[in-house]
Amino acid sequence: MAALTRPATGGSGGVGGASGPRQPHVLSNRWLQALAVIVVFVAGYFLFRRLGSPSWAGPFPTGIGDEFMAWLDGVYAWIVENRNTSPLFLYGFNYVSVGLGSAVVLINRILDMLTWSGVTVIGVLGAWRVAGWRVALLVLATFAVFALTGLWNESMTTLALIITSVSIALLIGIPLGILAGRSDVFYRVIRPVLDFMQIMPAFAYLLPFVLLFGIANPAAAVVTAVYAIPPAVRITALGIREVPKGAVEATTSLGSTPWQILTKVQLPMAKRTILLGVNQTIMLAVSMVVIASVIGAGGLGDAIYQALAKVNVGEAFQAGLAIVMLAIAMDRVTGAVGHGAHTPNIAPRFQLPILGAGLIVVIVVVTAARAMGVRGWPRDLSVDLSAPVNAFYEALQDGIGTYTAALSEWTLTWVLSPLSNLLTGSPWWFVLIVAAALAWIFSGWRAGLVSAASFLVIGLLGVWVNAMDTLSQVLVAALVTIVLGVVVGVLMSRSDVFATILRPILDAMQTLPPFVYLIPAVAFFTIGRVPALVAAVVFALPAVIRLVNDGVRGVPAGTKEAALSQGSTRWQLLSKVELPMARGSLLLAVNQGIILVLSMVVMGALVGAGSLGFDVVFGLAQNELGLGLASGLAIVCLGLFLDRLTQGRRAPRA
Amino acid sequence: MRKGARLLAVGLALAMVSSCAVRTDQIARDPNTVRIALNGWVGYEASAEVLAYVLREEMGYEVQLMRVDEQPSWQALDQGVLDVIVENWGHEELMELYGPEGNGTVVDGGPNGNEGVIGWYVPAYMEEEYPEITTVEGLKEHTDLFRTAETGDKGEFLGGAPGFVTQDQGMINAFDLDLEIVYAGSEASQITEVRRRYANEEPVLFYFYDPQWLQEELDLVRVDFPDYEEGCADDLSSVPCDYPAYELNKIFRAGFVETGDPAYQFLDNWTWTNADQNQVAQMIADQGMDPTDAAEVWVEENPDVWRSWIPEGFEPLS
């Protein structure tokens, strides 16, 4: 989720910047070095086991970490006691809390006052005006899904929360982005902060925000905004930076003030890119409001939880469908604003009358509906999708359940457990050196240092063993994701028909909240680490497939023809020309795949993956701030290591 | 008219934001809305939905059900965004923190009539095959039955959701059982796994509780441990006894009690039995009924039960 935006900012740069295919032997040399390091690592593991694992060759001591957690728990207790007496809260956080909470309630009330017919009319007319009739039809379909699934009120609650949090995210994000676009120093300062915000699992900062801003709507709005700010900042900065230097210089020479340059040149020229940032912000907000229902935000996410508490997969799917539709509709509307594509062409003199007519229609509809006592869509008029979905699910379970369970056991015994033993059973300093060496081999000495530091911090946080177990799960899931993603991505680039069929499926996979497929994963793969692995692969796969497809399709046709005319086979064409030339995209796909898998660590804990993810969930559920936060920070450290390991010697721009 | 008053209340709350010190309980809320916590299990939902139904349909209130875990819902009472928890399991430590001895923001509302049992359960088919397995000694001998790929050469104990009250590790230590806890991570995944093994008649040993709708669907047997005695669970690293029986109670926000509102009196009067709750819970979980519809069915069938909860002389708003 977090990193969805990166392809937009760094993708083209990475691909375009890669200079031709590298010589294969350089690459294989590097792989040989890495292999040697891994062989030494495995040999070392068995050697230390032979020595009987003395204490100096064990996991990182937890003393310092325990103290840190205890200190955080102390902070927690202090806040609980002083929330309504300390000036910090009375004159600080409580303002935000009460203001935001009230804003969400107010917007929800307005949507409620407009009745379902009013909201639909406004939505459809608005979508038509800014994005054309195709998108308007899509919006109409979305509202129909809300109504017919019987989730109208829930959808409105979610919409109110999205409106509030996106507004905050843009109010803060766009000015920051403008600053970052104009000042290199500021950009360099804020970039690591944004990285941190994107890798930190959302579950881990739910509790601190609940503490500071109060449970339910206020915290939910803040958490969602925090989650959605990074793309707004990054993409706005990119847009400002991409304004041609010549244009800025020309205006400067005409004696414009910096403010005039900004408002007259930079902002108008960067408008499209900034709108792309708005689009990404909304998409992230949509995915976050589902998680926010863990802290009482209600809405569609809540509907999913309710269904899951009853283990009713069909019902969860129904609510998931409503969210997918909401996400796709919002994506298309804001996307169209950015491209300005299918906007109806209205002569200026008709614009005001049409706006007026629209308003009158809305007023008439709302008054009529209110007069008839209509409010939310009547629940009785809904279509039940859950029964057929459940029937399908059960049939599938009867059909292949035993095979998938056997596959699960095999994976656990032969892949996950040995790797976990290897990582948790080796001395901590040995793991640290190996990790640093690998990062150095693949991405240079800077990356090696960062990796060593990450592992050291993990140790200091006092969660070493759990972190190593989580790392083993992430590595396996990432490997599966990348292999599958490259295969499917190459197939997709080969056939336009296949690509057309696949694209909406990928859209749905990316926007469907993971909660929906967690429970089926348990039913098929038994509880524990394997269903978590499966869910992570499902979540991370679409981004990888897309990037591989884009990369391979981006290879110039002339180059391919030249290779074919020299008598290359299709396989040679792929392995010698296309894949090496798409190297930038492939690297980015690997990087994104790993980061996305990592962002599912906490979700995986909900189906028994244990380790860091479980401690984050446990910390939230049992109010243990120290444990939850330390585990969340350790996940960030793992992310830092994996990111540096895979970003290559020539780091992409973003 | 009521709508106007409500908007005014929201506006007032917003105006208050611009005055000086702000307490978290000044968040916009309707005086006419009762806000009930909705903890994540179906039995709880049954109670909350029936109460919400009567408050809405018979007494003219609006009800907001807020789904949160047990601990966060105490926090929500403390912060003033919820009015009541209708089924509380223990949590003495939270009572110390937020109750009259601590912050003074919550009040014990007395028992709700339900009795709660937590324990270790196995399917009945296991007891048929190994009759002694429901005793401590028998369980100790047969821990190898529960081995899985996840736990290796130890038996697997399937733990409950992370938000629940647990002393399992202490019991494993105290009775020296060769078991390892695998945390399901959520109740939904735990139930899914139990159901899957039940269908295949595979061994499974797990944390569970009653009243719970799955108890009606599957034939489960509780493992017998020495009875709970006061203080035996104080040291969570070694607990030589079973879980206590819980007299489930209600927890009110202190400010809500002070209003003396009929809605408060109604909730204060309310008590019902495990059978009542299970009846509604089963309609929701087993028959897949909409919770509100299930509440409606119960309310229509049991007027004499719920009428006694409505405060005397209460005139419903029209």
Image: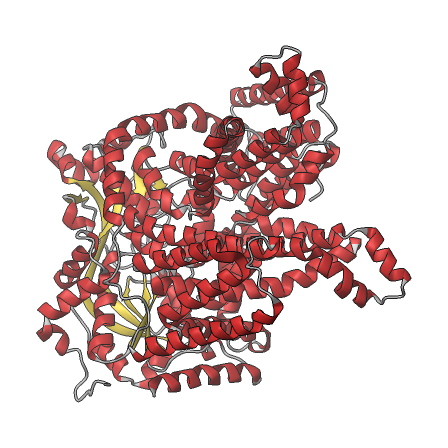
Residue A118, placed above or below residue B7: above
- Determine the residue positioned at 19% across, 83% down: B311
Question: Observer-nearest residue: A602 or B175?
Answer: A602
- Determine the residue positioned at 27% across, 28% down: A402
| Residue projecting furthest to the top | A567
- Determine the residue positioned at 71% across, 35% down: A16
- Determine the residue positioned at 70% across, 53% down: A239
Left/right placement of residue A407 relative to residue B303 reads: right
Q: In the picture, which quadrant includes the N terminus of chain B?
A: bottom left
Q: In the picture, which quadrant includes the C terminus of chain B?
A: bottom left
Left/right placement of residue B71 relative to residue A63 reads: left
Which percent across, then down, holds residue B294?
A: 18, 62
Q: Is residue B178 visible?
A: no
Which percent across, then down, holds residue A196?
A: 62, 50
Q: Quadrant of residue A185?
A: bottom right
Residue A399, placed above or below residue B293: above
